[in-house]
Structure formats: structure tokens, C-alpha cells
Image (cartoon, rainbow, N blue to C red):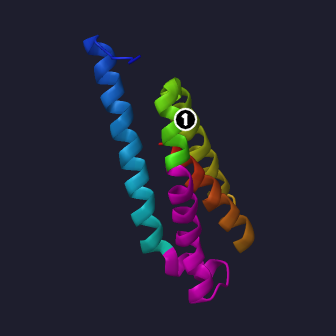
Amino acid sequence: MTNMVTDRKDQLVLYVVMAMAFFLDGLDGTIVTVALPEIGKSFSMSTSDSSWVVTVYFMMMAGLILVFGKIADKGAIKKVLVGGFIIFALGSLLCALSYSSTFLLISRAIQGIGSAML
């Protein structure tokens, strides 16, 4: 059974939502890399420790993307996508409120989970 979007308005909404998901995912991956030296200074992290800020995000995303893809293929695509936006936004908020390097890494892991759902 396939769920096709045939209404033009619904198609446009779907395209905009998917474009936002791809944009957020790509932006987050690049912007953190640029800010990494400053993030390391803010939390008094060594270069190798600060690299975990990027690594933990991609590890969570890569480890879960197939799982959430399979769940979406079984008909729950809207729930996965909406859940992904919510979890990604929550992870972003927690990153902004991070008070320690450990909390930042946990927040980045949450972002990675949301990214896998997008």
C-alpha cells in the first residue's frame, strides 16, 4: 500500500518540509565544525575532546538512520518526520543551554537522533 500525495497544496507543503529538513541537517553538520575551536575554548576542552562534539552527532545519526528509515517505510513517515523535528529542536535547545562538555555531548547525541529521523 502506498500513500501518494496528489493534492498540489499538500505536495507543496511536503516539498517545503523536506527542504527544511535537508537544510537543517546540512547546516548543523557544517556550522558546528566552523565553531568547534570556540566551543572547545568555552568548555576548556582539548582538541581531541572537542572533536567528539562532531563525532557523537554523526555516530548517532549513522547508527539510527536505517532504523528510522525502516519505521518510516512501514507507514509512519509523518510521525517519524515530526518526531525528528521535535527531537532535533530539543537537542538544539539543550546544546544552547549546555553548562558542561558532558551535557553538550549528550545534547549533540540527542540532535543526532533527531537528524536520523529527518
Residue found 62% across the figure and 51% down from its top: 91
Image quadrant for the N terminus?
Answer: top left
* Percent x, y of residue 59: 55, 64
103 displayed left or right of 110:
right
* Percent x, y of residue 105: 66, 67
Residue ranking furthest to the front: 1
41 displayed left or right of 73:
right
* Percent x, y of residue 86: 59, 38
* Percent x, y of residue 116: 51, 49
Q: Is residue 99 visible?
A: no
Q: Is residue 74 visible?
A: yes
Residue found 56% across the figure and 28% down from its top: 79
112 displayed left or right of 30:
right
Q: Count the marks.
A: 1
Question: Would you identify the image quadrant in which residue 82 lies?
Answer: top right
Residue ranking furthest to the top: 7
* Residue situated in front as seen by the camera: 90 or 71: 71
Residue found 58% across the figure and 59% down from its top: 60
Question: Would you identify the image quadrant in which residue 19 lies?
Answer: top left
Q: Which residue is mark 1?
A: 71
The stretch drawn in magenta includes residue 38? yes
Q: Is residue 102 above or below residue 71?
A: below
Q: Which residues are magenta?
A: 36-65
Amino acid of disc 1 = Ile
The stretch drawn in magenta includes residue 89? no
51 displayed left or right of 30:
right
Residue found 50% across the figure and 76% down from its top: 36
* Residue situated in front as seen by the camera: 51 or 36: 51
| Disc 1: CA contacts within 10 A as few (<14), some (14-19) or many (>=20) | some
Q: Main secondary structure of the magenta part?
A: helix
The secondary structure type at the circle numbered 1 is: helix
